[in-house]
Amino acid sequence: MMQKIDRELGIHGSRWRTVHKGYFANPEVAMPLIKTLKNAIALSSPPPAVVVDLGGGTGFVLQELLKHGQYPGVRFINVDISKRQLAVDTDSRILAIRTSVTEVTRDLFETKNRPLLFVMRSVLHYFGYTGLLPFLRHLRAQMEPGEFFVHQTACFEHQIDAQRLNLLYQRMRIDKWYPTAKELETCLEETGLAVHSIHEVPKLCLTSRDLAERYRLSREDVRGISAEISLEYGETPAVFVVTPNGFTAYLYYQIFTCVAI
Protein backbone atom coordinates (compact mmCIF):
# COMPACT_ATOMS: atom_id res chain seq x y z
CA MET A 1 0.00 0.00 0.00
CA MET A 2 2.88 2.37 0.75
CA GLN A 3 3.96 2.25 -2.91
CA LYS A 4 0.54 3.61 -3.94
CA ILE A 5 0.91 6.44 -1.43
CA ASP A 6 4.44 7.26 -2.62
CA ARG A 7 3.15 7.88 -6.14
CA GLU A 8 0.77 10.51 -4.76
CA LEU A 9 3.00 12.49 -2.42
CA GLY A 10 3.18 15.37 -4.89
CA ILE A 11 -0.45 16.27 -4.22
CA HIS A 12 -0.32 15.80 -0.45
CA GLY A 13 -0.24 18.73 1.93
CA SER A 14 -1.79 22.06 0.93
CA ARG A 15 -2.25 20.89 -2.70
CA TRP A 16 -4.79 18.33 -1.48
CA ARG A 17 -7.29 21.12 -0.84
CA THR A 18 -7.52 21.96 -4.55
CA VAL A 19 -6.88 18.68 -6.37
CA HIS A 20 -9.85 17.31 -8.34
CA LYS A 21 -11.51 20.75 -8.13
CA GLY A 22 -11.33 20.68 -4.35
CA TYR A 23 -13.61 17.65 -4.02
CA PHE A 24 -12.01 16.38 -0.80
CA ALA A 25 -12.04 19.77 0.91
CA ASN A 26 -15.56 20.84 -0.06
CA PRO A 27 -17.94 21.08 2.92
CA GLU A 28 -21.04 20.66 0.74
CA VAL A 29 -19.66 17.49 -0.87
CA ALA A 30 -18.77 16.13 2.58
CA MET A 31 -22.14 16.94 4.16
CA PRO A 32 -23.83 13.57 3.38
CA LEU A 33 -20.97 11.80 5.14
CA ILE A 34 -21.11 14.19 8.09
CA LYS A 35 -24.86 13.65 8.46
CA THR A 36 -24.39 9.88 8.27
CA LEU A 37 -21.67 10.02 10.92
CA LYS A 38 -23.85 12.09 13.23
CA ASN A 39 -26.64 9.57 12.80
CA ALA A 40 -24.32 6.63 13.53
CA ILE A 41 -23.09 8.34 16.69
CA ALA A 42 -26.69 8.91 17.76
CA LEU A 43 -27.59 5.28 17.05
CA SER A 44 -24.62 3.88 18.98
CA SER A 45 -25.58 2.46 22.33
CA PRO A 46 -23.64 3.28 24.37
CA PRO A 47 -22.26 6.26 22.43
CA PRO A 48 -18.70 5.92 21.11
CA ALA A 49 -15.91 7.16 23.35
CA VAL A 50 -13.50 7.28 20.41
CA VAL A 51 -14.10 8.21 16.75
CA VAL A 52 -11.25 7.17 14.44
CA ASP A 53 -10.84 8.33 10.84
CA LEU A 54 -8.77 5.70 9.04
CA GLY A 55 -6.70 7.22 6.24
CA GLY A 56 -8.12 10.61 7.20
CA GLY A 57 -5.41 12.63 5.48
CA THR A 58 -5.61 16.29 6.52
CA GLY A 59 -8.28 15.59 9.13
CA PHE A 60 -10.94 17.39 7.11
CA VAL A 61 -13.79 14.95 7.85
CA LEU A 62 -13.31 15.09 11.62
CA GLN A 63 -12.98 18.87 11.51
CA GLU A 64 -16.27 19.12 9.63
CA LEU A 65 -17.93 16.74 12.09
CA LEU A 66 -16.82 18.92 15.00
CA LYS A 67 -18.24 22.00 13.27
CA HIS A 68 -21.69 20.42 13.22
CA GLY A 69 -22.05 19.02 16.70
CA GLN A 70 -20.87 18.85 20.29
CA TYR A 71 -19.44 15.56 21.52
CA PRO A 72 -18.36 15.94 25.15
CA GLY A 73 -16.08 13.16 26.33
CA VAL A 74 -15.44 11.80 22.82
CA ARG A 75 -11.84 11.52 21.57
CA PHE A 76 -11.22 12.14 17.86
CA ILE A 77 -8.27 10.46 16.18
CA ASN A 78 -6.99 10.90 12.63
CA VAL A 79 -4.85 8.03 11.31
CA ASP A 80 -2.78 8.47 8.16
CA ILE A 81 0.56 7.27 6.84
CA SER A 82 1.44 10.54 5.09
CA LYS A 83 3.41 13.03 7.16
CA ARG A 84 2.56 15.79 4.69
CA GLN A 85 -1.18 15.19 5.04
CA LEU A 86 -1.09 15.14 8.82
CA ALA A 87 0.82 18.43 8.90
CA VAL A 88 -2.04 20.39 7.28
CA ASP A 89 -4.50 22.38 9.42
CA THR A 90 -3.74 20.67 12.70
CA ASP A 91 -6.62 20.86 15.19
CA SER A 92 -5.92 20.50 18.89
CA ARG A 93 -9.17 18.58 19.34
CA ILE A 94 -7.96 15.84 16.99
CA LEU A 95 -5.11 13.48 17.83
CA ALA A 96 -3.02 12.62 14.76
CA ILE A 97 -1.41 9.20 14.58
CA ARG A 98 0.98 8.42 11.75
CA THR A 99 0.74 4.77 10.81
CA SER A 100 -0.67 2.54 8.10
CA VAL A 101 -4.31 1.59 8.50
CA THR A 102 -3.22 -2.03 8.06
CA GLU A 103 -1.26 -1.74 11.31
CA VAL A 104 -4.16 -0.34 13.32
CA THR A 105 -5.20 -2.25 16.41
CA ARG A 106 -7.79 -1.42 19.01
CA ASP A 107 -5.09 -1.06 21.67
CA LEU A 108 -3.59 1.85 19.71
CA PHE A 109 -6.60 4.01 20.60
CA GLU A 110 -6.63 3.24 24.32
CA THR A 111 -10.36 2.70 24.42
CA LYS A 112 -10.18 1.03 27.86
CA ASN A 113 -13.03 -1.26 26.83
CA ARG A 114 -15.19 1.68 25.80
CA PRO A 115 -16.95 1.69 22.39
CA LEU A 116 -15.38 3.18 19.27
CA LEU A 117 -16.56 4.15 15.82
CA PHE A 118 -14.49 3.88 12.63
CA VAL A 119 -14.89 6.20 9.66
CA MET A 120 -13.14 5.98 6.29
CA ARG A 121 -13.41 8.07 3.15
CA SER A 122 -12.16 6.97 -0.26
CA VAL A 123 -9.61 4.46 1.04
CA LEU A 124 -10.82 0.88 0.50
CA HIS A 125 -9.83 0.87 -3.18
CA TYR A 126 -6.17 1.20 -2.13
CA PHE A 127 -6.16 -2.44 -1.03
CA GLY A 128 -6.70 -3.77 -4.53
CA TYR A 129 -8.69 -6.82 -5.53
CA THR A 130 -6.70 -9.25 -3.36
CA GLY A 131 -6.27 -7.03 -0.34
CA LEU A 132 -9.82 -5.87 0.33
CA LEU A 133 -11.13 -8.92 2.18
CA PRO A 134 -8.01 -9.35 4.37
CA PHE A 135 -8.19 -5.70 5.42
CA LEU A 136 -11.91 -5.86 6.22
CA ARG A 137 -11.31 -8.99 8.31
CA HIS A 138 -8.51 -7.20 10.16
CA LEU A 139 -10.71 -4.18 10.78
CA ARG A 140 -13.62 -6.29 11.99
CA ALA A 141 -11.24 -8.00 14.44
CA GLN A 142 -10.62 -4.62 16.09
CA MET A 143 -14.34 -4.02 16.64
CA GLU A 144 -16.80 -5.23 19.22
CA PRO A 145 -20.30 -6.37 18.19
CA GLY A 146 -22.63 -3.42 17.70
CA GLU A 147 -19.92 -0.90 16.86
CA PHE A 148 -20.21 1.13 13.65
CA PHE A 149 -17.95 1.44 10.61
CA VAL A 150 -19.05 4.31 8.34
CA HIS A 151 -17.22 4.54 5.03
CA GLN A 152 -17.56 6.43 1.78
CA THR A 153 -16.31 4.13 -0.95
CA ALA A 154 -16.16 4.31 -4.74
CA CYS A 155 -18.23 1.58 -6.39
CA PHE A 156 -20.38 1.16 -9.48
CA GLU A 157 -23.85 -0.07 -10.27
CA HIS A 158 -22.79 -1.81 -13.49
CA GLN A 159 -19.94 -4.27 -13.88
CA ILE A 160 -18.78 -2.80 -17.19
CA ASP A 161 -18.28 0.61 -15.57
CA ALA A 162 -16.20 -0.93 -12.79
CA GLN A 163 -14.13 -2.78 -15.39
CA ARG A 164 -13.58 0.42 -17.34
CA LEU A 165 -12.22 2.26 -14.30
CA ASN A 166 -10.18 -0.72 -13.16
CA LEU A 167 -8.50 -0.86 -16.58
CA LEU A 168 -7.77 2.86 -16.27
CA TYR A 169 -5.94 2.35 -12.96
CA GLN A 170 -4.11 -0.71 -14.25
CA ARG A 171 -2.77 1.33 -17.14
CA MET A 172 -1.73 4.08 -14.73
CA ARG A 173 0.29 1.36 -12.93
CA ILE A 174 -1.74 1.70 -9.73
CA ASP A 175 -3.08 -1.42 -8.03
CA LYS A 176 -6.39 0.04 -6.92
CA TRP A 177 -9.65 -1.83 -7.43
CA TYR A 178 -13.22 -0.59 -7.74
CA PRO A 179 -16.02 -3.10 -7.14
CA THR A 180 -19.67 -2.95 -7.97
CA ALA A 181 -21.89 -1.91 -5.07
CA LYS A 182 -23.18 -5.48 -4.87
CA GLU A 183 -19.64 -6.92 -4.73
CA LEU A 184 -18.69 -4.51 -1.97
CA GLU A 185 -21.78 -5.30 0.06
CA THR A 186 -21.00 -9.01 -0.25
CA CYS A 187 -17.42 -8.44 0.97
CA LEU A 188 -18.67 -6.50 3.97
CA GLU A 189 -21.20 -9.15 4.91
CA GLU A 190 -18.60 -11.93 4.53
CA THR A 191 -16.31 -10.23 7.02
CA GLY A 192 -18.91 -9.71 9.73
CA LEU A 193 -19.93 -6.16 8.86
CA ALA A 194 -23.68 -5.96 8.36
CA VAL A 195 -24.81 -3.14 6.09
CA HIS A 196 -27.25 -0.94 8.00
CA SER A 197 -27.80 1.68 5.29
CA ILE A 198 -26.40 2.98 1.98
CA HIS A 199 -26.48 6.55 0.70
CA GLU A 200 -25.18 8.09 -2.52
CA VAL A 201 -22.91 11.13 -2.58
CA PRO A 202 -21.69 13.43 -5.38
CA LYS A 203 -19.52 11.75 -7.99
CA LEU A 204 -15.86 12.68 -8.41
CA CYS A 205 -14.67 14.05 -11.76
CA LEU A 206 -11.21 12.79 -12.76
CA THR A 207 -9.55 14.67 -15.59
CA SER A 208 -6.52 13.19 -17.31
CA ARG A 209 -4.67 16.39 -16.40
CA ASP A 210 -5.24 15.84 -12.67
CA LEU A 211 -4.43 12.15 -12.95
CA ALA A 212 -1.23 12.89 -14.84
CA GLU A 213 -0.12 15.13 -11.99
CA ARG A 214 -1.23 12.70 -9.31
CA TYR A 215 0.39 9.60 -10.83
CA ARG A 216 3.20 11.16 -12.87
CA LEU A 217 1.85 10.20 -16.27
CA SER A 218 3.41 11.31 -19.54
CA ARG A 219 1.46 12.63 -22.52
CA GLU A 220 2.11 9.28 -24.20
CA ASP A 221 0.63 7.49 -21.18
CA VAL A 222 -2.53 9.62 -21.37
CA ARG A 223 -2.95 9.12 -25.11
CA GLY A 224 -2.43 5.37 -24.80
CA ILE A 225 -4.91 5.03 -21.94
CA SER A 226 -7.52 7.10 -23.75
CA ALA A 227 -7.20 5.03 -26.93
CA GLU A 228 -7.22 1.63 -25.18
CA ILE A 229 -10.24 2.25 -22.98
CA SER A 230 -12.17 3.83 -25.81
CA LEU A 231 -11.42 0.82 -28.04
CA GLU A 232 -12.10 -1.80 -25.34
CA TYR A 233 -15.23 -0.38 -23.73
CA GLY A 234 -16.27 2.67 -25.70
CA GLU A 235 -17.41 5.90 -24.13
CA THR A 236 -20.23 6.41 -21.67
CA PRO A 237 -21.28 9.91 -20.60
CA ALA A 238 -20.56 10.56 -16.90
CA VAL A 239 -18.32 7.47 -16.70
CA PHE A 240 -15.58 7.83 -19.32
CA VAL A 241 -15.31 10.22 -22.26
CA VAL A 242 -12.45 11.14 -24.57
CA THR A 243 -11.48 14.83 -24.64
CA PRO A 244 -9.20 16.80 -26.98
CA ASN A 245 -6.37 16.63 -24.44
CA GLY A 246 -7.00 13.18 -23.00
CA PHE A 247 -10.07 11.92 -21.15
CA THR A 248 -12.44 12.53 -18.28
CA ALA A 249 -13.60 9.75 -15.96
CA TYR A 250 -15.91 9.66 -12.96
CA LEU A 251 -15.93 7.80 -9.68
CA TYR A 252 -19.28 7.11 -8.03
CA TYR A 253 -19.33 7.01 -4.23
CA GLN A 254 -21.72 5.50 -1.75
CA ILE A 255 -21.74 5.80 2.03
CA PHE A 256 -22.08 2.46 3.81
CA THR A 257 -23.09 2.43 7.45
CA CYS A 258 -21.99 -0.97 8.78
CA VAL A 259 -22.43 -2.66 12.14
CA ALA A 260 -20.10 -5.30 13.53
CA ILE A 261 -21.94 -8.56 14.17
Image (tube, helix red, strand yellow):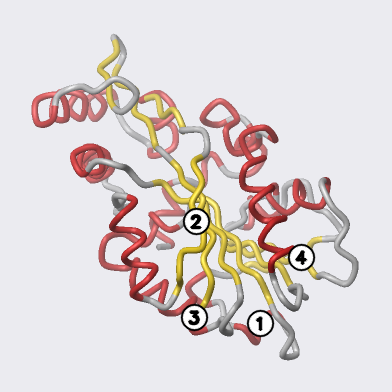
Which element is circle 4 on?
A: strand
Dot 2: few (<14), some (14–19), or many (≥20) neighbours within 10 Å? many
Residues 159 and 13: in front is 159
State if disc 1 and disc 4 touch (CB < 8 Å).
no
Return the x and y of residue 223 as percentages of the image width and height.
21, 22
Amino acid type at circle 3 is: Ile
Earlier along the polypeptide chain: callout 3 or callout 1? 1
Q: Residue at x 56, y 83 (%)?
A: 145
Which element is circle 1 on?
A: helix
Q: CA distance from mark 3 to mark 2?
A: 15 Å
Earlier along the polypeptide chain: callout 4 or callout 3? 4
Indicate whether 229 appears above or below 86: above
Dot 1: few (<14), some (14–19), or many (≥20) neighbours within 10 Å? few
Amino acid type at circle 2 is: Phe
Residues 28 and 134: in front is 28
Indicate whether 9 appears above or below 22: below
Residues 222 and 127: in front is 127
Q: Which residue is mark 4?
A: 76
Horizontally, is 159 left or right of 128 in the view? Answer: left
The mark lying in front, picked from 1 and 2, is 2
Q: Which residue is mark 3?
A: 261
Q: Which residue is mark 1?
A: 108
Earlier along the polypeptide chain: callout 4 or callout 2? 4
Amino acid type at circle 4 is: Phe
Q: CA distance from mark 4 to mark 3?
A: 24 Å
Q: Residue at x 73, y 54 (%)?
A: 62
The mark lying in front, picked from 4 and 1, is 4
Which element is circle 3 on?
A: loop
Dot 4: few (<14), some (14–19), or many (≥20) neighbours within 10 Å? many
